[in-house]
Amino acid sequence: MRTIVSRLIRHKSSIPQSRFVSASSSGGRYLSTDSNKIDEPFNVEEAETVHVPPPPTEKLLVLGGNGFVGSHVCKEALDRGLSVSSLSRSGRSSLQEPWASRVTWHQGNLLSSDLLKDALDGVTSVISCVGGFGSNSYMYKINGTANINAIRAASEKGVKRFVYISAADFGPAKYLLSGYYEGKRAAETELLTRFAYGGIILRPGFIYGTRSVGNMKIPLGVFGSPMEMVLQQAKPLNQLPLVGPLFTPPVNVESVAKVAVRAATDPVFPPGIVDVHGIQRYSQQKSR
C-alpha cells in the first residue's frame, strides 16, 4: 500500500499570528478578540497528495546471484523495490555496477544446510539459478542435490514461493548430458512436491544476453536475438520426433529475469512448469 502524505495549503490572512482568533456564527467569518475588525475566513484548498514508495516488505533470496542469469534476476528484483540477498560459493559479485552494492551477499555452498538456513532468515521467496556442467556425477550433484537441499530448507523455513530456473530438453543432448538433465528433473520433482501451490519451474532453452567474462563482455544477443525471432515462427517444428527440441527458440536473459521475479512475488502467478514460449509470453505482459 502506498503511503499518502497530505498537507493543507493555507492562503495568507490579515490576522497577525499573535492574535487569538475565535469562530463567529456569521457565515464562517472570523472575529479577532482585540479589535472589531472582521477578517476573511481561511481558505483551505483540496489536500495535495504526495506519493511515497512503500518500504520493501518482500525479501527475495537469489541462489547463484552472481552468475549470468542470477545477476540479472537481482537487478530486476531491485528495480521492483524488493529487498534482495544472494547466496553463492564465491559470495559478492565481481560486477562493478551500482546495483551490486544494494544486494546482501552471502558466501556458502548449497550442499551445507546450516549456511543455507541462515541465509533464509526472513525470506519470503527464493529464485534458484544454480546449475553447472562437468562429469555426470558432478552435474547431478550441482543441478539436482544442491537445489533439492535448497528446496527442502526453504520449505522448512516457511518460504511462500520458490522459482527454479531449469532447462528445456534438447532431444539428443539429454543423453549426452544425462547427469545434467537427471539432476534438473529430480529438483523439479522435489519442488512440485514441497511447493504444490507456490513452486514455479522455468524451462528456457539457450539464454542470450551480454555475458561478462573477466573484463571482457560477450554480446550473445548478436546471434541469439535473430534466432529467437526466426524460431518463434517455427513453433510447429518443436513437435517433430527426436529433432523437434532442437528448434526451441533462444530467450533473452532479461525476459527470464523478469518472469522469474514476477513468479516469485505475484501470488496469482500459476504454479507449475513454464516452457520457453510461456516465458516469452509472460515477459511481454505488464508486471503487476
Image (tube, helix red, strand yellow):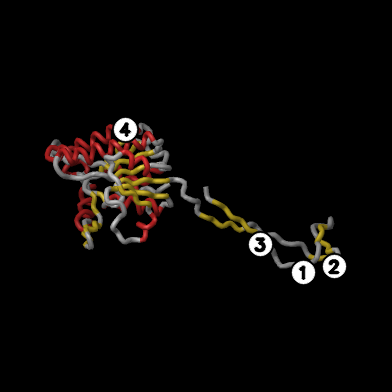
Q: Which picture quadrant has residue 17?
A: bottom right
Regarding mark 4 in the picture, which secondary structure is present there?
helix
Image height of 139 relative to 37, above or below? above
Image height of 140 relative to 283, above or below? above
- Type of the residue with mark 2: Lys
Label whose residue precedes the other's in the sequence (2 or 3): 3
Q: Alpha carbon of mark 3 to alpha carbon of mark 4: how far?
A: 56 Å
Residue at image point 34% right, 49% down: 106
Regarding mark 2 in the picture, which secondary structure is present there?
loop
Label whose residue precedes the other's in the sequence (4 or 1): 1
Q: Alpha carbon of mark 1 to alpha carbon of mark 2: how far?
A: 10 Å
Q: Nearer the viewer, residue 65 or 24?
A: 65
Horizontal and vertical percent position of residue 261: 36, 46
Horizontal and vertical percent position of residue 49: 58, 56
Horizontal and vertical percent position of residue 216: 21, 62
Regarding mark 1 in the picture, which secondary structure is present there?
loop
Q: Nearer the viewer, mark 4 or mark 1?
A: 4
- Type of the residue with mark 4: Leu
Residue at image point 49% right, 51% down: 55
Image height of 190 relative to 41, above or below? above
Regarding mark 3 in the picture, which secondary structure is present there?
loop
Q: Which picture quadrant has residue 12?
A: bottom right
Residue at image point 29% right, 48% down: 88
- Type of the residue with mark 3: Ile
Residue at image point 15% right, 39% down: 136
Q: Which residue lies under the disc numbered 3?
A: 9
Label whose residue precedes the other's in the sequence (1 or 2): 1
Q: Alpha carbon of mark 4 to alpha carbon of mark 1: how far?
A: 72 Å
Q: Which residue lies under the disc numbered 4?
A: 192
Q: Which residue lies under the disc numbered 2?
A: 37
Q: Nearer the viewer, residue 15 or 244?
A: 15
